Image: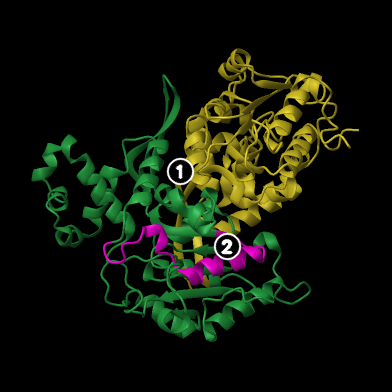
Chain colours: A green, B yellow
Amino acid sequence: MADPLPSWNDGVAKTSILDFVARVTTPGGQDYVAPEKRIATFDNDGTLWSEQPYPFQIEFALDQIKALASQHPEWLDKEPFKSVLTGDVKSVLAGGVPALAELVIATHSGMTTEDFDVMARNWLAAKRHPKTNRLFTEMVFQPMLELLAYFRANGFKTFIVSGGGIEFMRAFAEITYGVPPEQVIGSSGKLQFEMRAGGPVLTKLGEIVVIDDKAEKPAAIQNHIGRRPIASFGNSDGDLEMLQWTVAGDGPRFAMLVHHTDEAREWAYDRKWAVAPLDRALDEADARHWTVADMKEDWRRIFPFDS
Amino acid sequence: MADPLPSWNDGVAKTSILDFVARVTTPGGQDYVAPEKRIATFDNDGTLWSEQPYPFQIEFALDQIKALASQHPEWLDKEPFKSVLTGDVKSVLAGGVPALAELVIATHSGMTTEDFDVMARNWLAAKRHPKTNRLFTEMVFQPMLELLAYFRANGFKTFIVSGGGIEFMRAFAEITYGVPPEQVIGSSGKLQFEMRAGGPVLTKLGEIVVIDDKAEKPAAIQNHIGRRPIASFGNSDGDLEMLQWTVAGDGPRFAMLVHHTDEAREWAYDRKWAVAPLDRALDEADARHWTVADMKEDWRRIFPFDS
């Protein structure tokens, strides 16, 4: 049989994945799990695609601020917009979550869901990463694409559960990951149904309803899926509660962290990265024997465009 | 070929269903729809099961109030609890949505999601309808069970989109309708992740987040599915916006109302029923040539237990 995970080097991580899938899919085995309960949840930023120098959706927001600036002369005198418009990304990031939330709200509301989808798709089709000069949707992890396909081939439903915007991720998740919109869970804002002359629309309002990170991930999983995953994949402390929730269920369970250890081929960072550190979750993975995919050691290829 | 809808009498409604499904599934036809876009959404109360003399989940809430009364001596002097405990359902219903919301919050919060699921399943397995003496899960519409199965057999994903509680419906939707929890969308409250000695739990808090009715239905569809349905099924004005949203998309579209016209075999009510009238939606169905399933005329059999 062909290797379902050809971009994974032989090792503990690959073996643990193959072993888990074999156990839950062997009819009559003591760890067999019925197909409808084969739910696997995946973080996105840093787990399925890169997230350096900062999560890609922030770049989208920064670009939209610039595009909208002519309609907002007041932004020239108002932070964090002023720093965006003067190209001072460092100051923007220093503003932390409140500053980023303000930029996201300003650029992700006031339009219909369909107009936003077009904006996101156009940006994703054109904008390139400053370091690799690749489209962001090319900077996905080949080993994780194989893992997604492998789980689905074994009867799993694969869901994304990410702090990223639910509608931003839906603009590429189906084509890029094979994950349909109804299996994408993310941060979301309030939507308002309006009957216009041309027909009904849903308008994105500037009110955040869910920030799908940390303890909100299990809550969002319950809200959207209504079933506890048996396998979860993450790469930061923002995924810790999702992994804890996953492994606390009965029967066979699988939790995996992607550890960014490859400065040459991707980036190397963990405990000290301010935006989304991997710290407590790494300790817990060690203590509880969760699988850790060491990018440098375990991944033969990182991006699809790598030779 | 066997008739996929044997409980439907021949007529305009049945023909319109068969015709729509044939059109969207004929490869190369001008109305062909790719399988991943075959999304169908179904209201629950009054569309998939009965809802008289009042929606069944209210009966569940009333029973839980009685079960919890000994822990809440203050309820004896406080409406709407007092009326529940003295058996005066008429006064409870007269309190309208605010009174019912108070009862639902009091009985649907304060426990973990898993404990609530057990409560709901136990109640559904035991409680019988006052008129039919049947379990509530037996009071589902045989023609709609056939329709759900027929749509799924033709590549549709079937979703419930209902004002009912999301976790209450998930306690029976998979077994009763073949709709898995991740395809059940309903009203929902805030969930809180807590790490307890025995492991993590999600606690249901007494804060309503979504009342999945009227203009909130398209918003909930967008949030959970992220794709516009091509077919929707309802039975009241609470479903009007969902049907409007569905038919306003490009390509072939299908909207259907279940009209309760059979006093002998079920109930007959529409414009004047205070709880969930079918009034504006019936006018719009007429004006826009939506399909109306007349229960008396179109349905050979109503409940699975009917001969």
The kind of residue tagged 2 is: Arg
Which span is picked out in magenta?
A130-158
- Tell me residue A263's x, y (percent): 32, 79
Q: Chain of mark 2?
A: A
Counting every numbered tag in the picture gives 2
Camera-nearest residue between A227 and B116: A227
Please give the residue where the numbered disc 1 appears in the rendered image: B208
Label pair 2/1, CB-CB below 8 angstroms: no
Pick out the residue farthest to the left: A77
Residue B220 part of the magenta-drawn span: no
Tell me if B181 is positioned left or right of A171 in this view. Answer: right
Q: Is residue A23 visible?
A: yes
Where does residue A16 sit, x and y in percent of width and height?
Answer: 58, 81
Residue underneath mark 2: A228
What secondary structure is marked by label 1? strand
Residue appearing at x 47%, y 37% in the figure: B219
What residue is rendered at 73% in x and 19% in y?
A: B268
User: Looking at the image, which residue sits at the far front?
Assistant: A307
Residue A224 vs B48, above or below: the answer is below
| Location of residue B17 (image quadrant) | top right
The answer for how far apart the CA atoms under marks 2 and 1 are is 22 Å
Q: Residues within 10 Å of mark 1 (few under 14, many from 20)?
A: some
Query: What amino acid does circle 1 point to?
Result: Ile
Quarter containing the N terminus of chain A: bottom right
- State which quarter of the image contains the C terminus of chain A: bottom left
Question: Can residue B272 be seen?
Answer: no
Q: Nearer the viewer, residue B136 or B40?
A: B40
* Disc on res. B148: none
